[in-house]
């Protein structure tokens, strides 16, 4: 069974406290749970570990499900470890695992990862037909030899801090609200690809970002962003949309990096979204478009300069 192979990749040198989940975005709600986990682990002299999934379980349980990840696996692992987790075990969620009763899955965690404590959130469910719930897990813990703890949902002004809520805010372009919920700015990473080079003819050459399918991107509009390249970090005015002034169709993410003039085609670019400046607009002509672009660039410079002071 693939789960056995995945769990065998790590040798745990002492007993552990674990949590299980996708942890997409590793937002403040997740960190609320992680803090409880690391506190429980430290007080009992245990390692703190996370079992996460390389693929979203819903892609197996619902074949029509389309992923809309906030962060990729590498970023999730990095953020979890930065939050104090000792080890992260990514596993493949497949049909075999979907059919596995909660008791058998937890027995594997007890055996392979030396789990002595399990900490989960308030809407947690696992196992075939979700037979592992907040009601059944204490009994399973007694049987398998681990203690069970649940953590209340973290809210912000009565709004639950959950990945689904954050994805909706990203789609709306509400990146400042996303920052509040995540505890950091949302970012999108991809490869710089060839575009129509329209920005170059206007005097504002842009880097066209190709984000992998299945990942979230902000709603159409103009944003003040930070652009991270291997060569450094730069201010950038980023446009997302279909360029309605030119009716060229096709949704693009284009970043104009301030005070930058290098060939970065094929390079990896990460955009960190700080503020939505305005919605996408159709202008009457080039002159009015250029006037607005200059305003956007100036506003981006002022905003990001102030943010770094």
Image (spheres, grey):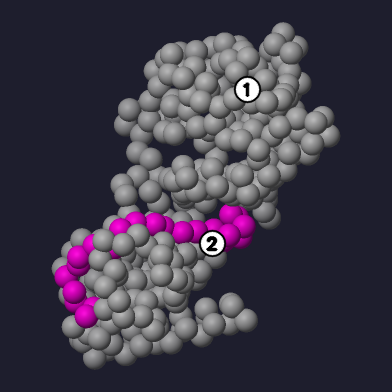
Apparent side of residue 148 relative to residue 197 in the rendered image (left or right): right
For mark 2, what is the residue? Answer: 185
Instruction: Estimate the x, y position of residue 181 in percent, counting from the top left.
Output: 60, 55
Q: Nearer the viewer, residue 177 or 298?
A: 298
Instruction: Estimate the x, y position of residue 41 in percent, counting from the top left.
Output: 76, 33
Q: Residue at x 32, y 90 (%)?
A: 291
> Number of labelled discs?
2
Instruction: Estimate the x, y position of residue 163 in percent, counting from the top left.
Output: 53, 45
Instruction: Estimate the x, y position of residue 53 in percent, counting from the top left.
Output: 48, 32
Q: Quadrant of the N terminus?
A: top left
Q: Quadrant of the C terminus?
A: bottom right
Q: Earlier in the sequence, mark 1 or mark 2?
A: 1
For mark 1, what is the residue? Answer: 113
Residue extending farthest to the top is 143
Whether residue 8 is visible to the viewer of this picture, yes or no, is: yes
Give residue 245's mark: none
- Which region shows up in magenta? 177-200
Q: Does the magenta segment cover residue 185?
A: yes
Q: Where on the picture, by quarter, is residue 139?
A: top right
Quick check: 204 above or below 207? below
Residue extending farthest to the right is 43
Give the Cα distance between marks 1 and 2. 33 Å
Q: Nearer the viewer, residue 228 or 11?
A: 11
Q: Where on the picture, by quarter, is residue 178?
A: bottom right
Give the secondary structure at mark 2: loop
Give the secondary structure at mark 1: loop
Q: Residue at x 26, y 73 (%)?
A: 263
């Amino acid at each position: 069974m693939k789960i056995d192979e995945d769990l065998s990749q790590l040798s745990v040198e002492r007993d552990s406290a674990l949590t299980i989940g996708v942890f997409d975005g590793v937002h403040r709600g997740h960190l609320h749970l992680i803090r409880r986990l690391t506190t429980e682990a430290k007080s009992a002299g245990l390692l703190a570990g996370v079992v996460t999934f390389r693929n979203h379980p819903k892609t197996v349980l619902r074949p029509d499900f389309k992923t809309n990840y906030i962060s990729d696996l590498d970023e999730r692992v990095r953020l979890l470890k930065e939050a104090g987790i000792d080890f992260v075990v990514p596993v493949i969620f497949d049909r075999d695992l979907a059919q596995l009763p909660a008791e058998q899955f937890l027995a594997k965690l007890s055996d392979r990862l030396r789990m002595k404590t399990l900490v989960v959130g308030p809407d947690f469910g696992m196992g075939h037909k979700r037979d592992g719930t907040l009601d059944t897990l204490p009994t399973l813990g007694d049987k398998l030899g681990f203690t069970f703890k649940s953590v209340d949902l973290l809210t912000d002004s009565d709004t639950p801090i959950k990945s689904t809520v954050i994805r909706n805010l990203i789609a709306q372009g509400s990146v400042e609200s996303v920052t509040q919920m995540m505890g950091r700015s949302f970012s999108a990473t991809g490869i710089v690809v060839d575009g129509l080079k329209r920005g170059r003819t206007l005097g504002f050459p842009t880097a066209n970002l190709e984000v992998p399918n299945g990942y979230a991107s902000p709603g159409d509009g103009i944003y003040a962003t930070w652009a991270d390249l291997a060569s450094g970090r730069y201010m950038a005015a980023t446009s997302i949309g279909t360029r309605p002034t030119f009716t060229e169709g096709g949704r693009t993410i284009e970043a104009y990096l301030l005070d930058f003039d290098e060939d970065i085609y094929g390079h990896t670019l990460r955009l960190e979204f700080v503020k939505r400046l305005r919605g996408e607009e159709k202008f009457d002509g080039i002159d009015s478009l250029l006037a607005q672009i200059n305003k956007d660039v100036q506003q981006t410079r002022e905003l990001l300069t102030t943010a770094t002071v």
